[in-house]
Amino acid sequence: MSHDTDKLIRQLSLVAFLMAERRPLTAREIKSVVEGYSEMSDEAFARRFYSDRSELVALGVPLHSQRDEFTGEELYTLRAEQYFLPKLDLDDEELAALQVALYLLEGQFAYAEPLRLALQNLALGRPTQLEAAPESALRVEVRDPDYSDEMSGRLTKLEGAISKQRTVKFTYWSISRDRTRERTVNPYALLPEAGSWYLIGRDLDQDAERTFRVSRIIGDIRFATRRERDFRMPEYDPSDFRGRQPWQYGDEQGEAEIDLDPDTAWWVERMIERGQVEDGVFRTPYTRVDLLAGWVLRQEGRARPLSPPELADEVAAGLERVLERHDGEPTKPPRPKARPEAEPLERPAGPLAPERFGVLQALLAHLLARCGDETSATIPAQELVDRFHIPPDQLDDHLQLLNLVNFGGGCYAVYATLAGDEVRVDKELFGDAFRRPPRLTPLEARAIRLALEFVGPMIAAEAQTPLERVRRKLEETFGEFALPETTEAEAGSEEEQLIRTLSQAIREQRLVEIEYVAVGEETSVRVIEPHALERELPWWYVHSWDRTRDAQRSFRLDRMRRASLLEESFDPRPGLEPRKLRDVRVARVLFDPEVARWRIERGALPLARGYALEEVGVGGTDWLVGEILSHRGFAEVLEPEDLRHEVAARAKKLKPALAKRPARARG
């Protein structure tokens, strides 16, 4: 047997023995009875036992130890009620709604397989149809711009390093400095933020906590040592790294004040966590005044800088550059630059898979649950392959491994044999002890938390119940792995209600009246025919026919003040494709070296002398103008000519509005 198989047998048998004895046990008792330890020398046992205990705790198995006050020996316990899932009061509708998440995220979600296993554990003992796509999954599309097979592989390696507390080395591209160097990092957590994945950890070379965008890691991620554990996870709050705006990453330089129009103030209060709005003035910490100036310019006069003076100066300078770049003939772009070939991965990692320990736990519970009160059962092999995504050629290996798990003294839980396309299961003496689903591993709990974060409002809409209720039930079940990174912002409940209304309207083909706040525009009221919802991280969109404008439109839900269901119904329009109108028109945009690297990262064509050229799909002129303004004159529309002139005209109109110092400015 392989080293990995030996370890799994030891760990599962250790869990079984501790639960069967129901009393504190010494290491000597464990060594003499538990499968896999008895043949070891004392030195080898001490090393392996310490490693197995650490891994089990990291997998969510609450193995406790305490020192005997009389003998001084360490005593180990594991109570069954701490190992199994508490009773979870999810009704069938709520469970089915969680199932929707699996289909919404399949193929765009690195944690799809741990999510699948978590749902199997939650559904143990009741009929489920995880292989049948729900009708509702066909009405929503999820897009993760940061997702790729390579990204999934990197997350796999980093998740493993986090759970095992292993130090990693990787080459990292610091985009702001345009430099690459090797980093040595103790990884603490992975967080999705604003549509991208970030690693939080301690940079050992800098001796400081840092965030690293995973897509900027180049080549392989390697373990720094051969040790089984390199560091102990410190206490820290992952929420400290969440909700930051682009101008808030890094070392804080001060606080800015910005005067806002009412509609923009409403949106800022709803969507920006780090900052506050009082009497129409937005106060925000900042690390880079240039990026904050870009945000001010994007608002097209509906945000006016008050302080510090450097912010007003940067806004004015950026606007002046926009005017200069769009006056006269377009700049002739430099020649294209050959793209460097990506460094091949030495050992490409596969998709993020649940821990094999967790798969075996769930498989054992399922086999015994299928036996029920009988002593045996016959199960189609394909059922196990489909339910647990076990490759058919590995199913027998999994079954044979479970056959070796014992409770000490030769007492076993199950004996399963694969014969053709069937699995014969015989329940052994201690079989009933494992008929309940085990607690979710941290990775499985994390997969559900991320599913709630990515498509939670859609889950709530399908369950016909507030997301908070589903979330609360899951948190109570997860115990210490209770979704600590989830924030309950007011925007979440508002978004959930919007999706509930729009989902019902799509299902019943009914009109909806929306109140919408677009960047640079007054609030407008529209009547729409909603056709489909889309989650393009980090935003939700509804694709619709806008009856007010008599045109196809896509609306971002974070900019909806309300959505009211109307009684009137509509017929689907033939030929209408429910998607964002990315390609109604195409603008050629030249980016200067100051911002080109960020555009190249998103697919722009690199040019000589550090420039970049991008063909940008334009669904609406207002969006393009705001996008160009946000780059503060370091982006130039080359064509079409009318869009180039529109940018110049809007910038000229904006200049006097931003030149005036608002009356409420201090000093």
Image: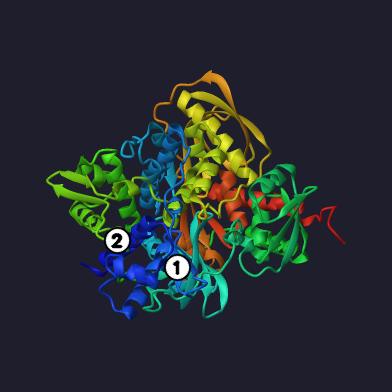
As displayed, is residue 456 above or below residue 319? above
| Residue 98 screen position, x and y as percent | 44, 40
The kind of residue on which mark 1 rests is Leu
As displayed, is residue 41 above or below residue 660? below
Between residue 572 and residue 245, name the one nearer to us: 245
Q: Residue furthest top?
A: 568
Q: Are marks 2 and 1 in contact (CB under 8 Å)?
A: no
Left or right of residue 640, residue 158 in this image: left
Between residue 82 and residue 295, name the one nearer to us: 82
How many tags in the picture? Answer: 2
Residue corresponding to mark 1 = 75
Q: Can residue 486 be spotted in the picture?
A: yes
Q: Can residue 324 be spotted in the picture?
A: no
| Residue 288 screen position, x and y as percent | 65, 66
Quadrant of image for the N terminus: bottom left
Which residue does the image show at 67% across and 37% down from the upper left? 523
Q: Residues within 10 Å of mark 1 (few under 14, many from 20)?
A: some
Mark-to-mark CA distance, 2 and 1: 17 Å
Q: Residue furthest left?
A: 420
The kind of residue on which mark 2 rests is Gly
The secondary structure type at the circle numbered 2 is loop
Q: Which mark is residue 325?
A: none
Quadrant of image for the C terminus: bottom right
Q: Tag 1 or tag 2, which sits nearer the N-term?
A: 1
Q: Residues within 10 Å of mark 2 (few under 14, many from 20)?
A: some
Left or right of residue 637, residue 358 in this image: left
Residue corresponding to mark 2 = 408
Between residue 22 and residue 124, name the one nearer to us: 22
The secondary structure type at the circle numbered 1 is strand
**Quadrant in the rendering for residue 135:** top left
| Residue 524 screen position, x and y as percent | 65, 34
Left or right of residue 591, residue 259 in this image: right
